[in-house]
Amino acid sequence: MENIMDIAANLGIDREYIDNYGKYMAKISLKALDKGNKNGKLILVTAMTPTKYGEGKTTNTIGLSQAFKKLGKNVSISIREPSMGPCFGVKGGATGGGKSKVEPSDKINLLFTGDFPAITGAHNLLSSMIQNHIYHGNQLKIDPEKITFPRTIDMNDRSLRDMILNAGGKENGPLTRDSFVITPASEIMAIMGFSMDYDDLVRRLSKILIGYDINGKPVYSGDLKAEGAMAAILSDAIKPNIVQTTEGVPAFIHTGPFGNIAHGTSSILAAKMAMKYSDYVITEAGFGSDLGAEKFINMVSRIGNLKISAVVIVATIRAMKLLGGSEDKNGIASGFNNLKRHYDNLTRFGFHPVVAINKFSNDTEEEIQFLDGMLKKNNMEYQLSEVFMKGGDGALSLAKTVLEKCEKTTDNIKYTYNFDDGIREKIESIGLNIYGVNRVEFSKKALSDIRRMEKNGYAGLPICMAKSQYSLSGNPLENDDNILRVTSASVSSGAGFIVVYSGDIMTMPGLPKEPAACNIHIDGEGTIYNLE
C-alpha cells in the first residue's frame, strides 16, 4: 500500500486538509470541498435480487474502478463503511474480495476511524436525555408509552430487540419499554449520510422526532436542546474517510446505512468530495435495484443533486440458478427473468444499464453461452467480469463499455414519484412500477401511521422502503403472490424521509448458531485472520 498522504495528494487534495489515522487511513476536511475543481461523472453499481451468498457488488465496484485506472482514467470510488454486526455474524466483511479490495480491510471492517462509535454515542446521548428529562419532572409532558426513538449498538444482539428499563426500582425512573436497533439502522446514520455541512448537521439533529406528549403533539430532539452536544460528538465523523484499493485507486468510505431498512449508500459528502477531485466516481447502492438503486435515484441523488452518468447491474449465474430453483439451464432461464426485471427497472428511470456478469470459477462455458443468448435476445448489453481473480485486468471490457455509456448520458431521468405526491400514492408507485406487484395492501396501523404523518406535515418527504431484499415484492420467493403488504410507517424527520415497512423487518439482527466471530483470530504480531 501507498502512504495515504500520497494517495490524497495524487488527487490534488492539499495536505492541510488531510487528518491522518496511521499510514493508510485519513479523514478529509470539509474545507477541501471548495478547493476541488473537477465535476466527475458518477457511475452507480446495483444488482439483481441477491442471495444469501452475495453477488459481489462491492468487489465489482472496486474492480471496475481498477480497470478505469488501467485505462488511464482519473477515478475514485465512494462506498459504505461496514457494520461490525455482519462481520461477526453470517455475512463477513464488506471490503470486497480477492484482488479487488479496499485496504486496510481489517481496520475498515472493525472500528475504522471511529465513525460508527461516534454515531452510536450521539444516538445514545439523545436516548439518555429523553429518559433524564422524564426523570427530572418531564416539563415537555412526554408520554413514556409514545417514545419513538430507540437506542442503538453496532452489534447483532437479539436480546436487545425488546426490553424493560428501570427494573432496579423507582429511584431509577418509571418502568418503560425500550428497544435497540443496530447502528446502520439508526436515524443518526441516515442524518450523517445526508448532511451537507456542519450547519446542516445541527439542523437535522434538532429535527429528530423522539415521540409524542400526553396530548399527542410531536416532541423533537431540539426541544431537549440535544443537537449541539450530538453534533460535537460527530464533528470528526462527518468528515469523509479516504483509503485505497488493492491497485491504488482512492476510496472514499463514509457512513453505512443498511439497504433493506435504510437508504443503503455512502454519504452525499463522500460522493461530492470524490466528484470534486476525480473525472469518474464509482459508487454502489445496497442490494438489488428495487432497494438501493431505487432509493439512490428517487431520493439520494435528488437531495444531493448528484447527476448519474451510467448504471451497472451485477449478476451471477449462481444467483440465477438459486432464484430459478434448479442447477441446470432451466434454472438459469427462470432466474434470468429476475435479472430482466431489474434491468427494466433501470430503463424506466431512463438509463441503459450495462450488465456485469460476475464470473465464478465453476461457471461453465456452456452456461455462459446460454446466458449470452438470452442477454442478446433481450438487447441487454453485458460484459463478463473477473475482478476477484484478476483485479482491474478482469474488467477492462466492462470499463470500456461503461465509459461509452458515460459519454451518452442523459439528464432526462424519469422519477417514480414526485415529492409532493401523497404518501400512499408514492408507496403505490414504487410497488407497482419498481416491484411489479399487482396491488398494494395497507394494514390498519399503516393507514393510521400515514394519517398521523400527513397531519404533522410530513407528506412531502421521499419514501425509504424497508422490506426483504430476497424478493421483489418483499414476500418469500416460494410465496410471492405479487402483493406489496405495507405493515407500518414512521418518519425520520431529521434525515428527511418516511420509512415504510413491508413485512417483519428486523432492525436488530441476531447471531447465527455458529457466528463468524468464532473463526476470527489474532496472532502474536497483531495480524487479524478470517475477518472476510
Image (cartoon, grey):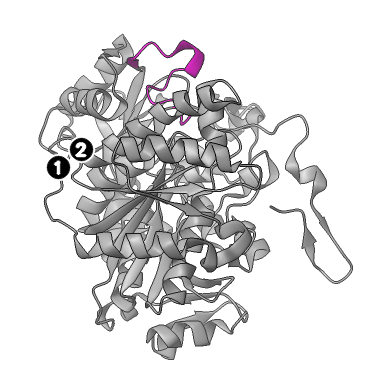
Would you identify the image quadrant in which residue 307 lies? Answer: bottom left
- Residue receiving disc 2: 348
Q: Please give left or right for residue 460 compared with residue 235 in the image.
A: left
Query: Is residue 481 positioned above or below 385 on the image?
Result: above
Q: Are marks 1 and 2 in contact (CB under 8 Å)?
A: yes
- Residue receiving disc 1: 414
Work out whether residue 215 or residue 526 is closer to the camera in this orientation and state it: 526
Question: Which amino acid type is marked by label 2?
Answer: Arg
**Residue 93 drawn at (x, y percent):** 63, 51
Work out whether residue 105 or residue 112 is closer to the camera in this orientation and state it: 105
Magenta-colored stretch includes residue 81? no
Q: Is residue 211 visible?
A: no
Q: How many marks?
A: 2
Mark 1 or mark 2, whichever is nearer to me: 2
Q: Main secondary structure of the magenta part?
A: loop
Q: Please give left or right for residue 100 compared with residue 439 in the image.
A: right
Q: Secondary structure at mark 2?
A: helix
Would you identify the image quadrant in which residue 277 lies? Answer: bottom left
**Residue 24 drawn at (x, y percent):** 60, 77
The magenta region covers: 468-484
Residue at 11% of width from left, 50% of height from top? Answer: 412
Q: Is residue 51 visible?
A: yes
Residue at 43% of width from left, 30% of height from top? Answer: 336
